[in-house]
Amino acid sequence: MKIPKRIQPLVDDGIVDNVLRQLMSGKEATVYVVQCGDEVRCAKVYKEASKRSFKNAVLYNEGRKVRNGRNARAMQKGSKFGREQQEEIWQNTEVDALYKFADAGIRVPTPFGCFGGVLIMELITDADGFAAPRLNDVTMTEEKALTDHAKVMDYVVRMLSVGVIHGDLSEFNVLVDEEGPVIIDLPQAVDAAGNNNAKKMLLRDVNNMTQYYSQFAPSLAATRYGDEIWAIFETGELTPKTVLTGQFIDSEVNADVDTVLNEINAAREEELDRLDRMSDSE
């Protein structure tokens, strides 16, 4: 196919050898399958802000640190230079999140670098070597839905344990290969401590995923993983090893956090006992 204008410099520099086909076009970028030496990879070409349909971007930018004072002032004024800096931060947020998530044990595509608004990364494939489907195109058994939902909840916990919330997690931003779910699309990743909308975004991420998986595992519809995760996070006790139960009891007293946490901990202990019994019986 004809080489897209934004990828041509990468071809000229020998980073990309050939563009094989367009994989998908979304609200923030167009993704192509490219040949890089002996490897077939993805090239994610970010759309310019004026052409990007991602809504309420300002909510996601809150809390993102800009070290250079000149850049910060330019961004506030909305100058051409400031807009360019904002775009660079938007793109670098995804690259940084990919590395951070991979280090935290979260399955994401391996990044190979971002060059002039083009992110080169691993192509996630299915068992036959074709591009892996997005979750919204996948049907599954109840057992598989429960297993994969548990993996995604573990990923959400691991994200929050390193201070990050996906911010746009849904069945459209998860790929599925032989090993299970793979998290994608991270330029809107949110600083959990620096963004006033963090809790709202985390609850939405968790509810989106739970609602989708509950089509195949109806018992998930009654769970409250988002509230449970956030309650533990607020106490400072959330770790990658935190065991979730999906249970949460609303406090009738505004500041009665301890009671809620005690209920969660009790349910977690029960879950740990159950897992131990299952392990002993195997």
Image (cartoon, grey):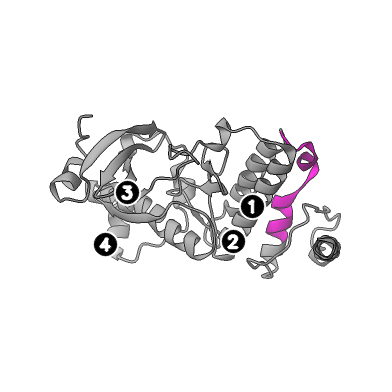
Asked whether, in this view, residue 234 is left or right of residue 133, the answer is: right
Q: Which residue is mark 3?
A: 119
- As measured in the structure, the alpha-carbon distance from the residue carrying label 4 to the one carrying label 1 is 42 Å
Query: In front: 106, or 254?
Result: 106
Pointers 1 and 2 in contact (C-beta within 8 Å): no
What amino acid is found at the position of numbered circle 1 in the picture? Lys
Asked whether, in this view, residue 256 is left or right of residue 241, the answer is: right
- The disc, 1 or 3, on the residue closer to the chain's N-terminal end is 3
Q: Which residue is mark 4?
A: 70
Image point (72%, 60%), residue name? 231
Pointers 4 and 1 in contact (C-beta within 8 Å): no
The local secondary structure at tag 4 comes to helix
Considering only vertical position in the picture, is 204 above or below 282?
above
Asked whether, in this view, residue 272 is left or right of residue 162, the answer is: right
The local secondary structure at tag 2 comes to helix
- The disc, 4 or 3, on the residue closer to the chain's N-terminal end is 4
Q: Which residues make up the magenta segment?
A: 216-231
Asked whether, in this view, residue 274 is left or right of residue 138, the answer is: right
Query: In front: 225, or 132?
Result: 132
Mark 1 vs mark 3: give the one in front.
1
- As measured in the structure, the alpha-carbon distance from the residue carrying label 2 to the one carrying label 3 is 24 Å
